[in-house]
Amino acid sequence: WTRNALLQPVGFSGCICLWFCRHSRVLLSRGHGQQTATEAATIDIADIDTTDHFDVINYLINHHAEISRTWHETEFGFESETTSTNPDVAAMLQLHVAQMKGRVETDNRIRQCDDAFVAFFDYGSDMHTELYNLDDGIRVVAYSNTQNLCTKDVLTAHAEVVSLFV
């Protein structure tokens, strides 16, 4: 397994796009064969470059069946808990959320072919995010610094999309 076998730029001006077919439990990368979820889940955490955000994301994609998530809307944002009974997955969840928070804070954008990510980064300076590591994952409290309802909409849309994935 290599990241390049799963992630290849396709369409949308070279943007990386993945499809996960829950019914067949196969991870597909257009034009690059298939890997079953069972095969993907055999990747050892020791093989992951934790400084590479995309390696972390791929690890979580490959282990998404082991992740649970709840969230609820608050007056100006959301609160969520994302957990796993697998300690390695829980640690990667914590790392991923911290990495993405850092990306938003430094405007280090990703997935600019996706309007949801564009909006998330556009409103990033108006977001306040608190991270609380749990024994089995992470709790996030995110809200608009200025009580801007557009920022709240962007935050809750993000929370909803992440929950649909899990």
Image: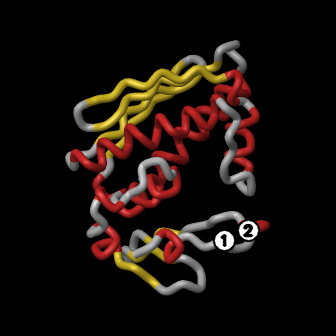
Callout 2: SS = helix
Residue 100 position within the rendered picture, expressed as x and y whole percent measured from the top left: 54, 39
Which residue ends up furthest to the top in the rendered image? 146
Marked residue nearer the N-terminal end (2 or 1): 1
| Camera-nearest residue between 4 and 110 | 4
Point 56% across, 17% down: residue = 75
Callout 1 crowding tier (Cα within 10 Å): few <14, some 14–19, many ≥20: some
As drawn, the residue found furthest toward the right would be 13
Q: Is residue 52 above or below residue 139?
A: below
Q: Is residue 53 left or right of residue 117?
A: left
Residue labelled with disc 1: 9
Question: Can you give x and y, in whole percent of width and height, for residue 122 in the image?
Answer: 76, 35
Task: Name the image quarter holding the N terminus.
Answer: bottom left
Residue 102 placed where, x, y %?
57, 33
Callout 2 touching callout 1 (CB < 8 Å)? yes
Residue visible at 37% across and 74% down in the picture:
25
Which sits in the foreground, 47 or 24? 47
The residue that mark 2 highlights is 14
Where is 88 relative to 20, above or below?
A: above
Amino acid type of the residue tagged 2 in the rendering: Gly
> Mark 1 falls on what kind of element?
loop
Residue 154, position in %: x, y?
Answer: 66, 34
Residue positioned 30% across, 41% down in the render: 83
